[in-house]
Image (tube, helix red, strand yellow):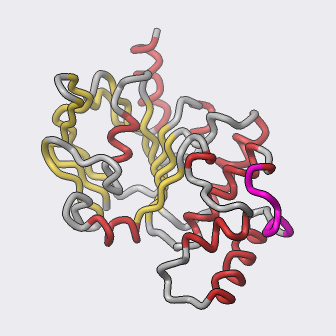
Amino acid sequence: MIEFDGVGHRYGERVVLSGVDLRIPERRVAFVGSNGSGKSTLARTINGLIVPTAGRVLVDGLDPARDGRAVRRRVGFVFSNPDSQIVMPTAGEDVAFSLRRSGMSRRERTERSNEILAEYGLGGFADHPAHLLSDGQKQLLALCSMLVLDPAVLVCDEPTTLLDLRNKRRFVELLHTLEQQIVMVTHDLDLLTGFDRVIVLDAGHVVADDSPGPALRRYRELAG
């Protein structure tokens, strides 16, 4: 369960979120809205990347502002640009780096990294230079580096921005196969088929909260 209780946030004098109250138990939830609506800021409060200036966020009863380490063990985060979170020279090393505090031996980390790369379509790429992967492969690598930690929640902040249409569809299809609760920030409305809930933000406020059909109609009205 993800809870937002009166969440607000400002950057200096600019208010980007105001009075957000939500309870999110569903498995597949999307935040949509125009640029500057506050959707990415709201998503980043879930694992403490941003600490709200008003209200609080809870993940299974844990506050990211006070229990950051415990929350980050439960919440994985995938950014729009995978280069911002790929930190090691090869794909295998990058996934293994996520396990550095796991207590596993180096050999165990390597074996687990190879297993998860193979599971999600990057088998045989463990020794491949990470920066030479395609955009789609890089996004899969970023996903693997989170999934290897077995989080309960996966937050994806516009993860298909750099992908072509085929890879966008493949990535979202893959998300649907995961056991994790997924919270996705996106502009790609056509990819939200099968989501349980869509939350529309505008100027820092929740203006629609429904199943995809009604919520996206409201969003298109606002954008029209």
Q: At 73% across and 63% down in the image, what residue appears?
A: 91
**x, y percent for residue 5:** 16, 48
Position above or below: 62 against 102:
above
Q: At 13% across and 46% down in the image, what residue appears?
A: 55
Front residue of this view, candidates 190 and 96: 96
Instruction: From the viewer's perspective, tell me whether residue 211 is left or right of residue 148.
Output: left
Front residue of this view, candidates 6 and 189: 6
Please check the rendered image and state whether residue 125 is part of the magenta-colored stretch, yes or no.
yes
Which image quarter: residue 197? top left
Which image quarter: residue 107? bottom right
Which image quarter: residue 68? bottom left
Position above or below: 25 against 198:
below
Marks counted in the figure total 0
**x, y percent for residue 106:** 64, 86
| Quadrant occupied by the N terminus | bottom left
Instruction: From the viewer's perspective, tell me whether residue 199 is left or right of residue 213.
Output: left
Please check the rendered image and state whether residue 93 is part of the magenta-colored stretch, yes or no.
no
Q: Which residues are magenta?
A: 124-131
Position above or below: 211 against 3:
above
Instruction: From the viewer's perspective, tell me whether residue 98 is left or right of residue 59.
Output: right
Q: At 34% across and 31% down in the image, what residue appears?
A: 38
Give the residue furthest to the top.
224
**x, y percent for residue 49:** 35, 50
Chief SS of the magenta region: loop
**x, y percent for residue 83:** 63, 46
Give the residue furthest to the right.
124
Q: At 62% across and 37% down in the image, what residue appears?
A: 191
Instruction: From the viewer's perspective, tell me whether residue 14 is left or right of residue 216.
Output: left
